[in-house]
Image (spheres, rainbow, N blue to C red):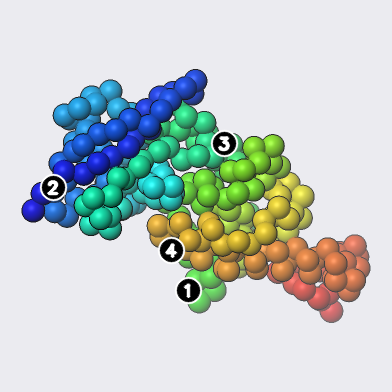
Amino acid sequence: MSYKAKFKVWRGDDGDGELVDYTVEVNEGEVVLDIIHRLQATQAPDLAVRWNCKAGKCGSCSAEINGMPRLLCMTRMSTFDPDETVTVTPVNTFPVIRDLVTDVSFNYQKAREVPSFDPGDAKPGELRMQQVDVERSQEFRKCIECFLCQDVCHVIRDHDENKENFAGPRFLMRIGELEMHPADQADRRNIAQDDHGLGFCNITKCCTEVCPEHIKITDNALIPMKERVVGRKYDPVVWLGTKLGIVKKGQDTPSA
């Protein structure tokens, strides 16, 4: 069964733009990305949109649909009433290049600022871990870097001036992943707070709500990192142990 749907699609560049009305055919089982492709094929051949896999795994087709950050390829047309006007706009937090394509280089800059995995002095083959030891941080590896969590985070969405000092939930989650990994020897609590702005996060869980991989970003990454930072900075026993060099990564009390 097919029907005609009303769409409003943002058209423009970094200088100016507007919502343009379209009426386009929709077939049963299609997703919003299908409709954008049909618009390109029939009415707007110069419409710019970023996409790759069309399977919800590359994270390329991030946009805002009726104001909600979502993947175009994972949003079924059946979720909308046939008489409803569907509005598609570029993600709000990052500068527009053209139409639905935005400049997300901010995220790659922040990625480069996160210190990489540090096995310490361990030689190849010396690390021994059970699966249960890595499961906690393994959840975060599901991230497809769609940057929807970055887009919806109001710390940078509503306050552009925070971008210099705030890495955003995706990269605070990366820091948490490494901090919780049993084989990583670096202590990342201070850099999470001092260099990447963990304190800006007020755990509204909006990042978790838009994650297409259903990663519990707030509960499993950001809140545990906040707890670790607070323990390091404000627990007097841990503070003293840190000064004396007898508190190591992952410890909340001095070792004997």
First reached walking from the N terminus: tag 2 or tag 1: 2
First reached walking from the N terminus: tag 1 or tag 3: 3
Secondary structure of residue under mark 3: helix
Question: Mark 2–mark 1 contact, CB under 8 Å?
Answer: no
Residue 183 horizontal/vertical position (percent) = 60, 64
Question: Which one is in front in this view, the residue at disc 2 or the one at disc 1?
Answer: 2
Question: Which one is in front in this view, the residue at disc 3 or the one at disc 2?
Answer: 2
**Does the image show residue 134?**
no
Dot 4: within a 10 Å radius of its alpha carbon, few (fewer than 14), some, or many (20 or more) residues? few
The residue singled out by tag 3 in the image is 106
Question: Mark 1–mark 3 contact, CB under 8 Å?
Answer: no
Q: Calculate the distance from the C-alpha at mark 3 to the C-alpha at mark 2.
A: 40 Å
Q: Which amino acid does label 1 sit on?
A: Gln
Farthest front residue? 83
Secondary structure of residue under mark 2: strand
First reached walking from the N terminus: tag 2 or tag 4: 2
First reached walking from the N terminus: tag 4 or tag 3: 3
Residue 3's disc number:
2
The residue singled out by tag 4 in the image is 214
**Camera-nearest residue between 71 and 224:** 71
The residue singled out by tag 1 in the image is 131
Q: Is residue 113 above or below residue 218?
A: above
Q: What residue type is labelled 3?
A: Phe
